[in-house]
Amino acid sequence: MFLLNEKFLQQITFILEIDKLKTVLRKTRILNENRFENSAEHSWQLALAAIVLSEYANEKIDVAHVTKMLLIHDLVEVYSGDTFHYHKEADETLAAREMEAAKKIFGILPEEQGKELLDLWIEFENQRTPEAQFAASIDRLIPMLMNSHSGGKAWKEFSITSKQVIDKNQHIKNGSALLWDFAQELIRGAIKKGNLS
């Protein structure tokens, strides 16, 4: 007979709690339906994109490390909600709320595991390692890709300008110069099509 120990119960509790990420809606629309993606879908797509595009990182990276980072980086939204990328600077409480949420969500896990994931989340937020910089590049590129292939729906809906897109996403180049070149092509194409002012 299988006996449930405290560590196992903490891990199961965490797995059940992160299911809430599926209910957190973002401002990017999915391509084949007229609805916003949720944060769980976003994280899944980023992890796969990082695996597929890892060869374009500026430096040699540990792809498994990047993938783990991308799978956990938005878990704080279970408690803090999603803040639209183009509104983050206006939210003076965001950093504190997200840190509190990170401690709460990762604190569900056994201490050692929780610390490992909290450290990964902080690494992503600080963007000082090649892995974090590449993860951040993917995190910004994929919404741009979705917007450019959906006729700029979210950009238009929220009156986002090309200057905002450039200013808020140019850190893509820190993780991948090639992906930043591609992102700029997406921006130019969106402007040409009238999908971005």
Image (cartoon, rainbow, N blue to C red):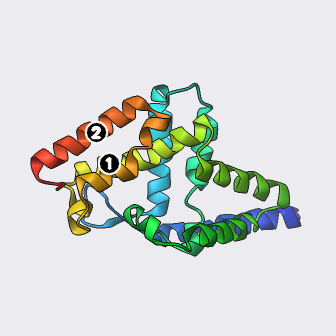
Q: Quadrant of the C terminus?
A: bottom left
Residue 101 place in picture, x, y as percent = 65, 70
Confirm whether residue 125 shows in the render.
yes
Secondary structure found at label 2? helix
Residue 81 place in picture, x, y as percent = 51, 73
Residue 59 place in picture, x, y as percent = 55, 26
The single residue placed furthest to the left in the displayed view is 193
Q: Nearer the viewer, mark 2 or mark 1?
A: 1
Q: Which residue is mark 2?
A: 184
Cβ atoms under marks 2 and 1 closer than 8 Å: yes
The quadrant holding residue 77 is bottom right
Q: Amino acid at mark 2?
A: Gln
Question: Residue visible at 21% across and 56% down?
Answer: 152
Secondary structure found at label 1? helix
Confirm whether residue 4 shows in the render.
no
Q: Which residue is mark 1?
A: 166
Question: Residue visible at 22% across and 54% down?
Answer: 150
The quadrant holding residue 15 is bottom right
| Residue 174 against residue 126 in the figure, above or below | above
Give 183 or 117, whichever is nearer the viewer: 183
Residue 66 place in picture, x, y as percent = 59, 40
The numbered mark at residue 133 is: none
Give the left or right position of residue 145, taking residue 96 as reference.
left
Give the left or right position of residue 146, taking residue 62 as reference.
left
Give the left or right position of residue 87, taking residue 75 as reference.
left
Q: Quadrant of the N terminus?
A: bottom right
Give 83 or 1, whichever is nearer the viewer: 83
Q: Amino acid at mark 1?
A: Ile
Identify the mark nearer the N-term, 2 or 1.
1
Give 46 or 195, whichever is nearer the viewer: 195
